[in-house]
Image: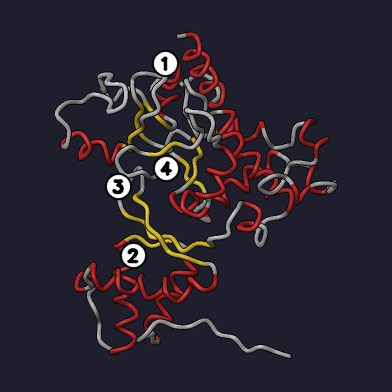
Amino acid sequence: MEIDWEPPLPAGYNDLHRSFLQNFMAQGTLTLKQGKKLLADLKSKTTFEPVDPDTITLDQFTDAIRTAREAVEPLDYDIRYMRDQVRDERVWVFYNTQSDPASQMATVHSAEEVAYIKRLLDAMFETYNTPRMEVMAVDEGQALKVSRPSRQSMGNGHVNGANGEDAEGSQSATRGLKHSEVLALLSNLVAEGWLEKSRDGFYSLSTRALVELWSWLVATYNDEEEEWQHIKFCEACKEIVTHGQRCNNVDCTIRLHDVCEGNFWRTRPDRKCPKCQTEWDGSQFVGERAITSRSAFQRSRAGRRGRRSEVAEDAGEEEAED
């Protein structure tokens, strides 16, 4: 017996909402500026009159978002926004609520590529993310280092999916990638909006990726029994921090986004850590600046000496010796 089921639609759902949702799904993310332009374009096609994006109000945009969200929730999709940690703008993300790297990317990437992406995330959030240096980013050389699975992971079969189940017993998923394939994949992941590449050549997760993989990242890398966690949250906005500041006390767990710290300190009587009361001078960083602020990196950049990956490693070694 066939069951012809359609998800319930919000009251007043019309062709404008449908077109808005279809465009949003295709793009994956929208800033307020992009959202206003999209709504203006759609209204122009409906009224056959040009509509200035500046006439679209925030309330109109959020109403379109709310209607789209109600339409997709029964299908295990959702829409939420997060402030971009670098550009300080709100980004709305359309995402699958049942997401992990394998299910999100298997439709457009091969098993080998998905397995590599998992190794890349391990490098970001484990290898180059320690209590002394919370980098959570990799440069090109570090990304190339995980082009192939380690012998241990190949022996265990854990190279794909959240816990490696998808790759268990699969020889094709353990071959790894050539360096040329890694570079092409990194470029594609930036173009697809999963990664961002900084001016200093570091790759980190985009706002879209942080929203889509939020639950998976916490479940995979955090340990409730430990005080220091691989996935950190801003003391002000409670969102994930991969670019920001940390307490001057290396043993303290308080973190702030750069875009949140101004308002945060304005509401407090002094610039002392709210947990350990250490003076907060904004000189200790979360993200690639944990590397790029080091004197070893600055010396090498000024002298144009060494490969970028060697510079990052030197800066990390310098920090470890401090």
Q: Which residue is mark 1?
A: 299
The reply to whether the C-beta atoms of the residues labelled 4 and 1 are less than 8 Å apart is no
Residue sitting at x 19%, y 73%: 55
| Disc 2 residue type (three-letter) | Gln
> Relative to residue 264, is residue 139 drawn left or right?
right
Which quadrant is home to the C terminus? top left
Marks 2 and 3 sit apart, C-alpha to C-alpha, by 15 Å
Spatial CA distance of label 2 from label 1 is: 40 Å
Rendered residue at 59%/86% (across/down):
5
Name the mark nearer the viewer: 4 or 1.
Answer: 4
Between discs 1 and 3, the one toward the N terminus:
3
The residue tagged 2 is 34
For marks 4 and 1, the one nearer the N-term is 4
Q: Find numbered disc 4 in the image and state the secondary structure of the residue it sits on.
A: strand
Mark 3–mark 4 Cα distance, whole angstroms, equals 14 Å
Real-space Cα separation, disc 4 to disc 2, in angstroms: 24 Å
Mark nearer the viewer, 3 or 4? 4
Left/right of residue 278 with respect to residue 319 in the rendered view: left
Residue 26 percent coordinates (x, y): 49, 69
Residue type, numbered disc 1: Arg
Determine which residue is flagged by label 4: 240
Q: Quadrant of residue 62?
A: bottom left
Q: Nearer the viewer, mark 4 or mark 2?
A: 4
User: Mark 4, residues whose alpha carbon is within 10 Å: few (<14), some, or many (≥20)?
Assistant: many
Q: For residue 92, what is the image quadrant? A: bottom left
The amino acid type, in three-letter code, at marker 4 is Ile
Residue farthest to the top, as pictured: 321
Mark 2 and 1 residues: CB-CB less than 8 Å, in contact?
A: no
Mark 2 or mark 3: whose residue is earlier in sequence? 2
Specify the label residue 88 is tagged with: 3
Q: Look at the picture and state if 271 lies above or below 167.
A: above
- Please state the horizontal and vertical placement of residue 44, each as a whole percent of the image: 30, 83
